[in-house]
Amino acid sequence: MNSIYFKEEHRMLRDQIRRYVEQKVMPIAEAWEEAGKVPREILQEMGELGFLGIRYSSEYGGSEMDTLGSVILAEELGRSTFGGFAITALVHTDMATPHLDNFGNKAQLAKYMPDIISGKKITAVAVTEPDAGSDVAAMRTRAVKEGDHYVLNGAKMFITNGVYGDIFFVAAITDPEAKASRSISIFAVEKGTPGFTVSKKLEKMGWLSSDTAELVFDNCRVPAENLLGEENKGFYSIMRNFQNERLVLGAQAMGEAGKAIELTLDYVTTRKAFGGVLFDKQAIRQRLAMLAARVEAGRQLIYHAAWLDAQGLDCIKEVSMIKAYCGELVNQTMYDCLQFHGGFGYIRESAIERMTRDARIQSIGGGATEVMLEEVSKRMVN
């Protein structure tokens, strides 16, 4: 792909990921949908190939690439047609681990990062709660310091990688008297810590190869040395990484939408109907052409925002636009693509059926469309 945003290293990365997905993922990933998880050996293989450490320090095995590297990873994993596989990897690389990378101290980085980048340990981020949703300020999980430990009590909901993950970056209130922006801390909590349990594996409409859980912390004693960054400064870590998370989700969505158009174009140019093929119908040609134009517009907005972020420039408005626009567009794209597949599109064995179910979460998770539009509108008048 020719683009003013990408260098040779970016193009090489894209080619490598695309080959891996086409050769090692797509032929066998249907079984992961049935199992409800991505095999650990696949994640470790991705680690060995460098896919899990694109943005991280070479000191721990990473490649030290920029934001555009994350966008390429997300877009290419989105093209796999298995959203659950894509999000399993992306939560690990770009939604959970950045909390450690941004605010972890030397000892914490040395302890966890090599295994995270290699895929030996898989991460999750635990912020969302049953009664809070997107409202971080409504968080109820508490962490009280007792000697050289913090005692956590509370619950987290909709946690991707929650069932089979190894290291959880958990947000909790450490100063209940302060306002939200000055009361939240983040802790690295390892699987098996006493008082930390997976209370329920959640069954979902889509993303079936991604494990999702409700977590409970019942007098969970976490060593004080597992506090990431400063006490009561976790809100800023959460807000900072929301931008990366939403950018990556937008890229995943456009990867999915672009692949859906490719699959549909192949179908309508070969499916015989009414004395020709479906692509002979002007309505179908034009709707697909307009979808392709909108997806390309979304893709270019993503690349531009990633470039801005890589330059250290503010892009909150652009990223919020991306999350709203791409989350809605991938659903519109899947609706039309399934429609053009006709009855076959409604059958479980078709990729487009799975992709349609998987896409539905894109306008909800990581910041619902309505929340994102509020973020955009605030910045339109300021």
Image (spheres, rainbow, N blue to C red):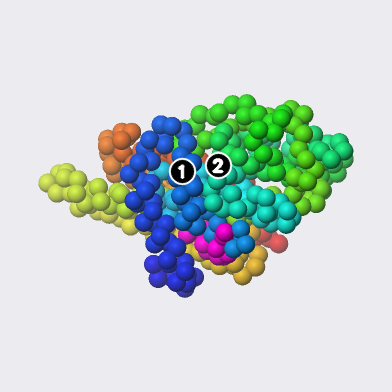
Looking at the picture, tell me which residue is in the foreground, 176 or 374: 176
Instruction: Identify the residue at image location x=84%, y=40%.
Output: 148
- Quarter of the picture holding the N terminus: bottom left
Residue 49 in view: yes
Instruction: Decide if residue 110 is on the left or right side of residue 45.
Output: right
Q: Residue at x 78, y 40 (%)?
A: 223
User: In front: 185, or 35?
Assistant: 35
Left or right: 110 as drawn, with respect to 8 = right
Quarter residue 66 falls in: bottom right
Q: N-terminal of the two: label 2 or label 1?
A: 1
Mark 2 — residue? 364
The kind of residue tagged 1 is Glu
Dividing the picture into quadrants, the one containing residue 243 is: bottom right
Residue 215: which numbered mark, if any? none
Q: Position of residue 131 (x, y in %)?
A: 68, 32
Question: Magenta span covers which residues?
Answer: 61-74
Q: Residue at x 75, y 32 (%)?
A: 220
| SS for dot 2 | loop
**Residue 245 on the magenta span:** no
Mark closer to the observer (2, 1): 1
Name the residue type under label 2: Ile
Give 370 or 58, whichever is nearer the viewer.
Answer: 58
Q: CA distance from mark 2 to mark 1?
A: 30 Å
Residue 362 appears in the rendering = no
Residue receiving disc 1: 41
Q: Position of residue 135 (x, y in %)?
A: 69, 41
Magenta stretch containing residue 65, yes or no?
yes
